[in-house]
Image (cartoon, rainbow, N blue to C red):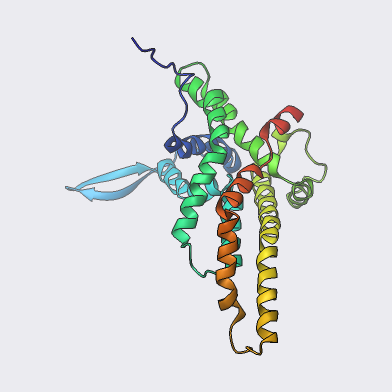
Amino acid sequence: MPAVPTRSSRRLSPLTLPLVLLLALVPSLAAAAGPQPTGLPPVTIANVGGEDISVSLAVLLSMTAITLLPSLLLACTAFTRIIVVMALLRMALGTGQTPSNQILVGLALFLTMMVMMPVAEQSWANGLSPYLAGELSFQAAWAASAEPFRAFMLAQIRDTDLLTFANLSGHTQGFASPADIPFGVLVASFLTSELKTAFEIGFLIFIPFVVIDLVVASVLMSMGMMMMSPMLVSAPFKILLFVLVDGWVLVVGTLAGSFNPVAAVVGAG
């Protein structure tokens, strides 16, 4: 009889990553919003058959906050760096809208899922799974599930970006530990660092294609073909070079390996 896999031996499905991210970031959003008022009055949202249908105002506020979660989830993961590099690569190739935005976003989402899967698995194992098994309280599970995502963002942040946003938020004395960094300062520093890293990678990608453009423009100028667009002539050569060096594998592999390991930050803390 084949062995049945236990709870600890099962790996997360890629489709569960958004759920883990959502549940892990809820405590950070709640902490940033501060204490919630109690005793909120119900709000009438419809009248069916002469009877009013009311919903608690707290429920309406929670549903409104959920609409901000997609942008928060993208801002707190590897998606920003990946999609910016992909857009710069398409610009360097000079292929216009090929690949299309839908293809780039789809590739960026699945690559983000691959990069963030170890973090999501750690969040599930430390907080969400013990809570569902009744081994942790609600607050302890929240803190344990959010910690891997905070550690991931801290591993990518530059010290100068963190100090800048800490000063802007009034924390001029710094922070005693990574746990003391407010959620807003953490996300703003993470996004700024990710944009800088993405543009650095994009600059390195641009260099060989700019060289091809310069060579083609010089050849056309020497031949007296000044009316012909150098971009039109250099586009096939750039595509050929990109295909010969297996560019997509190189770019995707470089992006996946460009993120700092989380263990270094956790161990340092």
In the picture, measured across the screen, residue 45 lies left or right of residue 122, that is left
Please identify the quadrant where the C terminus is shown: top right
Residue at screen point 71% across, 45% down: 157
- Location of residue 94 with respect to 27 vertically, above or below: below
Q: Quadrant of the N terminus?
A: top left
Q: Viewed as shown, does residue 94 lie left or right of 53?
A: right
Residue sitting nearer the eye, 130 or 155: 155
Residue found at the far right of this picture: 173
Q: Can residue 165 be seen in this view?
A: yes
**Furthest-top residue in view?**
1
Query: Residue 152 at x, y = what percent?
Result: 64, 38
Looking at the picture, how far across and down is residue 41, in whole percent?
Answer: 40, 42
- Residue 227 lies left or right of residue 214; in this view the side is left
Q: Where is residue 250 in the image (x, y as percent from the top left)?
A: 61, 50
The quarter holding residue 140 reads: top right
- Total numbered labels placed on residues in the image: 0
Residue at (32%, 48%) from the top-left corner? 44
Asked if residue 135 is positioned above or below residue 202 in the image, the reply reads above
Residue placed furthest toward the front:
223
**Residue 131 position within the rendered picture, expressed as x and y whole percent measured from the top left:** 49, 22
Tell me, yes or no, if residue 182 can be seen here.
no
Name which quarter of the figure residue 171 lies in: top right
Using the image, determine if residue 98 lies above or below residue 218.
Answer: above
Residue shown at 68% from the left, 36% from the top: 261
Foreground pick, 223 / 80: 223
Q: Residue at the location (48% across, 37% down)?
A: 17
